[in-house]
Image: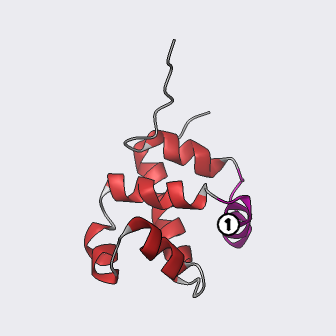
Amino acid sequence: MSLSTEAAEVLALQALGWLLSQDELLPVFLGSSGTSETDLRERAGDPVFLGSVLDFLLMDDAWIVSFCDANETPYDRIMMARAALPGGEQMNWT
């Protein structure tokens, strides 16, 4: 099963909203992505930026579990959403 781009963007926006509510994790995201709080508002509709939000969550299983549990989302949905956004394609080197 795959997600549409629209569904992936909605999930990524939910992830961004969740991330904004995480007082300890938000500064980690800002620091690792080089994003400012102003950038968050300006780029929230950018599919490439939303992909970076999901990339960040995918760095730690605990973050995925926490987000998914809080939003009643299946754990594999994050990876499916990431694949539907720009830059999320599977690379095949053969």
Instruction: Give the image location of residue 77, x and y in percent.
Output: 63, 49
The tally of labels here is 1
Q: Which residue is mark 1?
A: 63
Instruction: Give the image location of residue 9, x and y in percent.
Output: 43, 55
Q: Nearer the viewer, residue 18 or 32?
A: 32
Q: Quadrant of the N terminus?
A: top right
Residue 19 against residue 74 in the figure, above or below: below
The secondary structure type at the circle numbered 1 is helix
Magenta stretch bounds:
60-75
- The crowding category of the residue bearing disc 1, from other C-alpha atoms within 10 Å (few below 14, some 14 to 19, many at least 20), is some
Residue 12 is one of the magenta-drawn residues? no
Image check: 86 left or right of 89? left
Image check: 36 left or right of 18? left
Q: Nearer the viewer, residue 23 or 1?
A: 23
Residue drawn at x 56%, y 75% is 18
Residue drawn at x 68%, y 59% is 73
Residue 39 against residue 64 in the figure, above or below: below
Q: Nearer the viewer, residue 36 or 54?
A: 36
Instruction: Give the image location of residue 15, x and y in percent.
Output: 53, 66
Q: Main secondary structure of the magenta part?
A: helix
Q: Residue furthest top?
A: 94
Residue 62 is one of the magenta-drawn residues? yes
- Colour scheme of the picture: secondary structure
Q: Residue furthest left?
A: 42
Image check: 51 left or right of 68? left
Residue drawn at x 46%, y 68% is 32
Q: Nearer the viewer, residue 61 or 69?
A: 61
Going by the numbered disc 1, the residue's amino acid type is Trp
Residue 32 against residue 4 in the figure, above or below: below
Residue drawn at x 53%, y 60% is 56
